Amino acid sequence: MGTHDRGYKLLFSNKEMMRDLVEVERMIAEGTRNWADGWIKEGEERGEKRGEERGREHTALRMLEHGMDAALIAKLAELPEERVRRLAAQSSPQ
C-alpha cells in the first residue's frame, strides 16, 4: 500500500473529517452559485439600463426629426443636452 493510499484510507475512515469535507464542498458550491446569481443579476440590470437609454435616444431622434429644440428634447427624454446634440449631428445627412 502506497503513502497516498494510506492517507486516503485514513481520511475516508474519519467520519468527522468526511463531514467537514462535505460541508466545505457544499459551501463552495453555494458560494459559486451565489456569485453566479449576482453576476447574472448585475448583467441584467446593466442590460436594462442600456435598453432604457437606447429607448430614450430613439425617442430623441424622432423628436429631432420633427424639428424640436435640443434643450427641450433633453429635458423630455431625460438625456444630457450634449448627448442630444451628438445624436442630431450623427443623424443629419452629410
Image (cartoon, grey):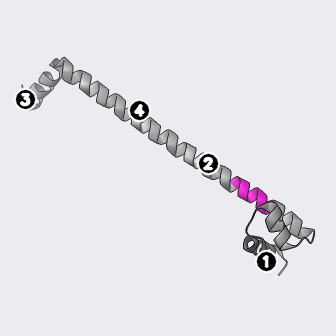
Q: How far apart are marks 2 and 4 (CA)?
A: 22 Å
Q: Residue at x 79, y 77 (%)?
A: 89
* N-term mark: 1 or 4: 4
Question: For the residues marked 3 and 1, what is the alpha-carbon distance in whole angstroms?
Answer: 76 Å
- Circle 1/circle 4 CB separation < 8 Å: no
Nearest the camera: 71 or 5?
Answer: 71
Dividing the picture into quadrants, the one containing residue 85 is bottom right
The vertical placement of 81 against 56, above or below, is below
Magenta segment: does it hold 57? yes
The mark found on residue 89 in the picture is 1
What residue did someone put label 4 on?
A: 30
Location of the C terminus (image quadrant):
bottom right
Instruction: Check disc 3 and report the residue beneath it.
Output: 2
Report the span colored magenta: 51-58
Q: Which mark lies nearer to you, 2 or 1?
A: 2
At x 19% / y 24%, what residue is drawn?
17
Looking at the rendered structure, the kind of residue marked 2 is Glu
Q: Name the residue under label 2.
A: 45
